[in-house]
Amino acid sequence: MHAKIKAVHAKAKAVHAKIKTVHAKAITVFVKTKAAYVKTKAAYVKAKAVFVKTNAAYVKIKAVFVKANAANMKAIVAFVKANAVFV
């Protein structure tokens, strides 16, 4: 009976060793995945900062365009009025 218990115990120890190995591998994969995630997140933050700056520049350029377009419309209206004088 004692021999059977020892055999079962030996098998349990072997299974436990395999579980520990798999767990260690899983931890390694998790650490690598986490490191990749941190790098990706850092790149995303940098890209978002660039986007914010670019978007701000776009908004400024668009504002200039809107002003120029308004001035152009005023000039067209003035031209039409001046042209009406000659008709």
Image: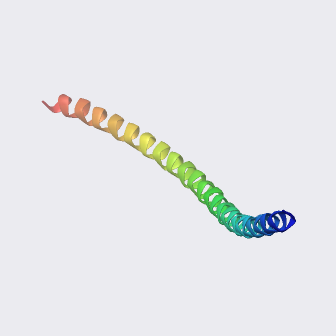
Task: Using residue 68 as the reference point, say whether residue 23 is left or right of it.
Answer: right
Residue 66 in which image quadrant: top left
Q: Residue at x 79, y 68 (%)?
A: 7
Q: Is residue 54 above or below residue 69?
A: below
Residue 33: x and y in percent read 66, 64
Identify which residue, 25 or 39, lies in the foreground: 25
Q: Which image quarter is the C terminus in?
A: top left
Residue 34 in which image quadrant: bottom right
Q: Residue at x 72, y 69 (%)?
A: 18
Task: Using residue 5 as the reference point, say whether residue 50 is left or right of it.
Answer: left
Q: Which residue is drawn at 83% across and 68% down?
A: 3
Q: Which image quarter is the N terminus in?
A: bottom right
Color scheme of the displayed model = rainbow
Q: Which residue lies furthest to the front in this view?
A: 1
Identify which residue, 67 or 61, lies in the foreground: 61
Residue 50: x and y in percent read 59, 58
Identify which residue, 72 or 42, lies in the foreground: 42
Q: How many labels does the image show?
A: 0
Task: Using residue 47 as the reference point, say whether residue 5 is left or right of it.
Answer: right
Q: Which residue is drawn at 80% across and 67% down?
A: 13
Q: Which residue lies furthest to the right in this view?
A: 2
Residue 40: x and y in percent read 62, 62
Residue 79: x and y in percent read 26, 36
Identify which residue, 73 or 37, lies in the foreground: 37
